[in-house]
Amino acid sequence: MKIFLTTILFLTSSIVPIMAAQIAIVTVPKAVVYSDQKLTTPIGYIAYGKKIKVGEVEKKDGTILPVVVSGRIAYIQIKDLALQNGTDGLGINTPKITEHDVELSFQTDQDKLSENNFFSASIGQASAGESWESYSGEFGEETSTFSVITLQMEHRNPAKDTSWGFGLTYFSSSTESIAAKSLAIEANLYYSLFNFRYMTLSAFGGLLFSGDFQVVQNEGEQKANGVLYGYSFGGMARILPYSKFGLFAGLSIRKIKVADLEPLETSSGAEIGIDSLSGLNLFAGISYKF
């Protein structure tokens, strides 16, 4: 009898949070559902735009809500949902999670890195800043922008708000009297701010380094080599962010320091140098999931 009463009390305490139900809409591409309150065992996900019934009693310091899946209680993060006013659940069924990845529960961190990987390529224009404008103007042709080409490998898990990427960035600027170029290593960290069905808006920041910044005057008459290092921050929009092919565009502010650049001599005999390349960067590109 005691065992029976204990079982009834346990089942009652488990089901009550679900009995007082409310309606929620999934607002992220994939809202992960977990079997435990510590969120250590994912059992699948619910896709963007789905309406589901969730409990009203928040768990884990107000960060998760219970949801019934196949007759059992599971948990979903509140940040992945938009809660609806009222509790009219006409036509709303408990989710069956037919779009789940069963192996997700058994993957190691190393296994996960082999998935959700993208190759991206972008082109853009970057303001070089007042320092470069004055520098190029000393040689007779003031220029204020650099062309930028970036190739990156990115890891973007649709179940997470953070992602990262790294690769190569090529800067170049050329006039009749002076030219500059550099191939840099760049790494970025992205954070998803808003998720829509076919688009995401993200903020990002990154670091950049190049050991070979070259400036050439009068087609090789004078050459100088230096080092670039700095950081950037900005925002971007992705269209079809998790599809085989996608598009993206954005802007960033770059703060780049120029070091160890040998001075060049102007026509008047003065030796001048440059200490920074900083300004606004506009870019657009494509991504491919592999």
Image: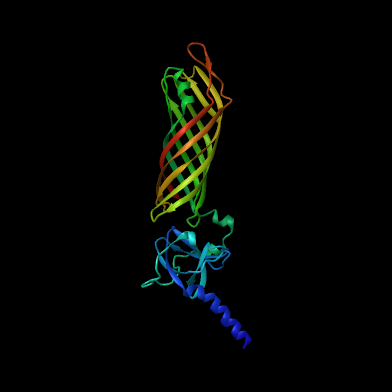
The residue lying furthest to the right in this view is: 2
> 32 or 38, which is in the foreground?
38
Figure coloring: rainbow
Above or below for 206 versus 56: above
The residue lying furthest to the top in this view is: 268
Residue 275 falls left or right of residue 236: right
Location of residue 26 in the rendering, given as x and y in whole percent from the top left corner: 43, 62
The residue lying furthest to the left in this view is: 91
Q: Could you tell me if residue 290 is visible in this image? A: no
Quarter of the image where one finds residue 210: top right
Quarter of the image where one finds residue 196: bottom left
Q: Quadrant of the N terminus?
A: bottom right
Location of residue 94 in the rendering, given as x and y in whole percent from the top left corner: 43, 72
User: What residue lies at 49% left-to-right and 44% top-to-bottom?
Assistant: 204
> 4 or 162, which is in the foreground?
4
The residue lying furthest to the front in this view is: 86
Please state the total of marks drawn on the protein image.
0
Q: Could you tell me if residue 199 is visible in this image? A: yes
Above or below for 69 versus 233: below
Location of residue 16 in the rendering, given as x and y in whole percent from the top left corner: 51, 75
User: What residue lies at 54% left-to-right and 26% top-to-bottom?
Assistant: 275
Residue 50 falls left or right of residue 40: left
Location of residue 290 in the rendering, given as x and y in whole percent from the top left corner: 47, 51
Above or below for 148 versus 79: above
